Image (cartoon, rainbow, N blue to C red):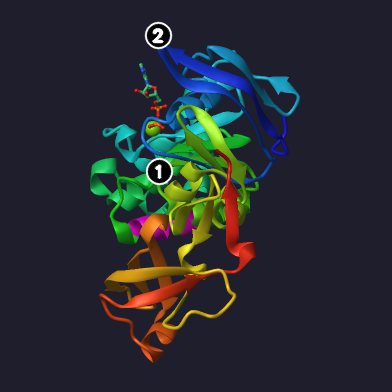
């Protein structure tokens, strides 16, 4: 097995008794890519990740890494590694001993495994804390140790389940950059589970949006954000208006809606009343009621808005380019 391995899920299914948690999903994760499994709580992200890791028995379907079918292999034999939350570090072992732990389990001599642990600690910028116990480290530092611990077996694929959710907002952004840098440097695949759209958009080469145990849409961040294919994706990714049109539905990005006081004759447009104006710094959000078309949000650049500020209660006209209206699958 090489680090150049593509991972393929073939009709992968997980049932817990009556619950169908993962419903026959198919997906290919390209070698050396950063992928995010994105979706709301309970949609089957963790079950999918744990099946890939070998921590959960597969109900049916296959997991193929490179040319090897790893579906039924034990976790340590698959070429994957899971990064566990930092609180899973052994409290009585130093950072270096925590990182070296799985090599100890594999019977590597002490000097060799500690040498390798120091290399990994250097990779995550933690050399100077090698001798500290987890209790003597900050949350972010513990996270780095947990990362090094997962990487020490040189996996082809690193699996991360909501790795940033326990961190405060400042640290979360820092670790996010760090994860991306590490993945780029190592050239291996990361599969990262998150319910945060921002996190997925910022990190991933590929986003897999899940809902109810199925894949709603998979694509680049730009494809998923700019051209959602279903109402669920448009609403979950956010920044879109979903409007009923001619028996179907379309999604139009809030920042692609032009707002004018006078209607332009001939142009496709919608009359709407301004219900709320929310100043967000670089942008201003208008909450609008457009009769039968329902509630609509328009996001204007602050520079545009302040040229002719619009007030609550005004009637305005909304328009957008036909290319910005994305038809949604029923
Ligand atoms: P997510 O990570 O997206 O929140 P999960 O994969 O944890 O979703 O859960 C998917 C579904 O499977 C949920 O309905 C959840 O309640 C159920 N589930 C998860 N783990 C178990 C389990 N060990 N036993 C029974 N049901 C489970
Ligand atoms: Mg989960």
Residue 52 image offset from top left, x and y in percent: 55, 26
> Relative to residue 219, is residue 98 depicted above or below?
above
Label 2–label 1 contact, CB within 8 A: no
Q: Residues within 10 Å of mark 2 (few under 14, many from 20)?
A: few
> Relative to residue 219, is residue 111 depicted above or below?
above
Find disc 1 in the rendering and name its residue.
195
Residue at 26% from the left image edge and 75% from the top image edge: 313
In front here: 94 or 148? 148
Q: Determine whether the residue tagged by mark 2 lies in a helix, strand or loop.
A: loop
Residue 240 image offset from top left, x and y in percent: 46, 57
Residue at 59% from the left image edge and 50% from the top image edge: 327
Q: Determine whether the residue tagged by mark 1 lies in a helix, strand or loop.
A: loop
Q: Is residue 7 left or right of residue 238?
A: right
Q: Residues within 10 Å of mark 1 (few under 14, many from 20)?
A: many
* Residue at the right extreme, as displayed: 67
In front here: 63 or 144? 63
**Mark closer to the chain start, 2 or 1:** 2
Q: What stretch is highlighted in magenta?
A: 171-178
Confirm whether residue 247 shows in the render.
Answer: yes
Q: In this view, does 271 lie to the left or right of 33?
A: left
Q: In this view, does 168 lie to the left or right of 298?
A: left
- Ligand 1 location (quadrant): top left
Find disc 2 in the rendering and name its residue.
17
* Residue at the bottom extreme, as displayed: 307
Q: Is mark 2 within 8 Å of ligand 1?
A: yes
Residue at 44% from the left image edge and 55% from the top image edge: 198
In front here: 84 or 127? 84
User: Does residue 174 belong to the magenta stretch?
Assistant: yes
Distance between the alpha carbons at the discs numbered 2 and 1: 25 Å
User: Does residue 199 belong to the magenta stretch?
Assistant: no
């Amino acid at each position: 097995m090489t680090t150049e391995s593509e991972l393929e899920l073939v009709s992968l299914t997980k049932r817990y008794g009556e619950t169908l948690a993962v419903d026959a999903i198919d997906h290919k994760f390209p070698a050396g890519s950063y992928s995010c499994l994105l979706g709301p709580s309970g949609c089957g992200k963790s079950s999918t990740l744990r099946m890939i890791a070998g921590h959960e028995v597969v109900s049916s379907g296959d997991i193929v890494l490179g040319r090897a079918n790893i579906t039924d292999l034990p976790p340590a034999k698959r070429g994957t590694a899971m990064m566990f939350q930092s609180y899973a570090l052994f409290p009585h072992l130093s950072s270096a001993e925590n990182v070296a732990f799985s090599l100890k389990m594999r019977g590597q001599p002490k000097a060799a495994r500690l040498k390798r642990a120091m290399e990994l600690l250097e990779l995550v910028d933690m050399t100077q804390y090698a001798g500290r116990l987890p209790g003597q480290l900050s949350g972010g530092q513990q996270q780095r140790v947990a990362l090094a611990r997962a990487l020490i077996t040189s996996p082809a694929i690193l699996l991360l389940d909501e790795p940033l959710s326990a961190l405060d907002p400042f640290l979360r952004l820092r670790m996010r950059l760090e994860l991306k840098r590490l993945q780029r440097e190592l050239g291996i695949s990361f599969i990262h589970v998150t319910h945060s759209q921002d996190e997925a958009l910022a990190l991933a080469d590929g986003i897999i949006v899940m809902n109810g145990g199925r894949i709603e849409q998979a694509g680049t961040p730009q494809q998923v954000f700019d051209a959602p294919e279903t109402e669920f994706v448009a609403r979950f990714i956010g920044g879109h208006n979903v409007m009923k049109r001619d028996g179907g539905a379309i999604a139009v990005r809030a920042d692609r809606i032009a707002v004018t006081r006078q209607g332009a004759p001939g142009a496709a447009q919608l009359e709407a009343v301004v219900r709320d104006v929310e100043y967000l710094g670089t942008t201003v959000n208008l909450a609008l009621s457009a009769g039968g078309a329902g509630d609509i949000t328009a996001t204007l650049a602050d520079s545009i808005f302040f040229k002719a500020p619009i007030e609550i209660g005004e009637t305005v006209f909304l328009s957008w380019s036909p290319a910005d209206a994305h038809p949604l699958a029923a």
